[in-house]
Amino acid sequence: MASIIDTKESKYIKACRGDNMKVPPVWLMRQAGRYLPEYRAVRQKHEFLEICNNPELACEVTLQPIRRFGFDAAILFSDILIPLVPMGANLTFGNGEGPRINPPFRSLAEIEKLRSVDPREDLGFVLESIRMIRRELPAEVALIGFCGAPFTLATYMVEGGKPNPFANIKALMYKDPRAFALLGDKLKNMVRIYLREMVDSGADAIQLFDTWAGTLHSSDFKTNVLPFVKEIFGDLRDLNVPMTYFVHNGSHLLRDIKETGCNVVSLDWRCSLSNARKIFGKEMALQGNLDPTVLLGDEKTIRKKVRGILDEAVGNGGFIFNLGHGILPMTPISSVEIMLDEIRGAK
Ligand code: CP3
């Protein structure tokens, strides 16, 4: 049983399955986060990892944006890097510096030492958060579980932090393909069982974040990313939940992304929805793709840009409105309200 509550009627799920709606479902990447005063209030008392590790706190912050904006989907509050901890990574989040993995994993010997993960045993708090959130959410709001894809997780493990300019991960890929493949394989195994357990615990859909795969040439994507991602989606197909794949900066990879076996493609703002539709056809749903910085603009601009996306996407296959990447911490609440008003046509 994938879900305790039947969310088949959720607008989000319907759009993922290809239904086209005049008013599309909407949620935002990083919708639970620092732009919300109620999130900042929780963060004043608790560290980020503490919130991720505590089901009550994770549940509370997951629900915050649903209560305030009535989004059509909730995304579990966690981070793609959390499952790397039981594999053996020393993960910290410095204030404002983003994640660090120290020491990084750069040699075959270091990679060989990585442990395999038993999600029930090692990540039980995440599965408990999912059960708790699903109980609290209205039935028509879908719950999205997620994981990082192997290449993006490998990037953090090898770089040790913000990947700039991807020298270490690419050096490993080009110099030591055996170590790179072993790391990819270990991560792939973790991702498959972790996502399966998330669905088993009540997630109605899953999203695989491959933020950094866009740094690769198509030929390297085909060799070093696609086989892992394809295997993950192939393995999870029997769960019969929508599976979304997100690549940041991936406009040059759309034809390769089509081969992954995902049901929904999450696009960043650099590619046009109508071009993407030509490539993906109507069998795949599209999600996206407002530039998050538009929400720092004035009301007229926000409405115009949102309308532009709707004009391109509505009436043309399954579509879920989202941003092209995470919402920025300095985004005014009023901008999100204007965006929703334009989508839902309240005026
Ligand atoms: O989207 C959501 O609301 C669900 C929760 C979520 C977070 N991170 C919470 C978070 C999800 C789905 C992620 C995914 C994630 N994490 C990705 C893939 C998507 C993307 O943004 O490209 C990546 C690459 C990460 C790694 C990560 N976590 C980075 C680079 C950072 C620092 C950047 C930043 O915004 O500070 C984080 C921290 C993080 N993850 C925060 C949140 C709400 C901010 C933590 C805080 O409150 O201080």
Image (cartoon, grey):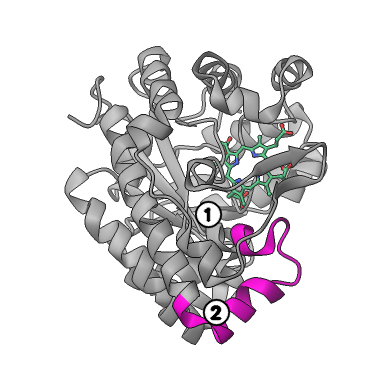
Residue 118 vs residue 54: left or right?
left
Label 1 is placed on what type of residue? Asp
Task: Give the alpha-carbon distance from disc 1 to disc 2, as whole Å.
Answer: 41 Å
The residue indicated by pointer 2 is 173
Up-down relation of residue 107 to residue 38 (above or below): below
Instruction: Answer whether residue 325 is visible to the viewer in this image.
Output: yes
Residue 132 screen position, x and y as percent: 40, 16
Q: Is residue 150 above or below residue 25?
A: below
Query: Please, is residue 68 above or below residue 239 in the view?
Result: above
The front one of 37 and 183 is: 183
Q: Secondary structure at mark 2?
A: helix
Q: Position of residue 245 (x, y in %)?
A: 43, 57
How many numbered discs, if any? Answer: 2
Q: Secondary structure at mark 1?
A: helix
Q: Nearer the observer, disc 1 or disc 2?
A: 2
- Residue at 68 percent across and 29 percent down: it is 48
Judge whether residue 157 is colored magenta: yes
> Taking the image as drawn, is residue 278 in sight?
no
Label 1 environment density (alpha carbons within 10 Å; few <14, some 14–19, many ≥20): few
Residue annotated with mark 1: 311
| Tag 2: amino acid | Met
Residue beneath the point at 44% across and 29% down = 126
Picture quarter with the C terminus: top right
Task: Choose between 81 and 276: the one closer to the eye.
Answer: 81
Mark before the other along the chain sequence, 1 or 2:
2
Mark 2 neighbour class, 10 Å CA radius: few under 14, some 14 to 19, many 20 or more: some
Q: Which residues are magenta?
A: 156-178
In percent of the image, x 73 and y 39: which residue is there?
93
Residue 303's mark?
none
Residue drawn where x is 63% and y is 51% of the image: 325
Give the prevailing secondary structure in the magenta stretch. Answer: helix
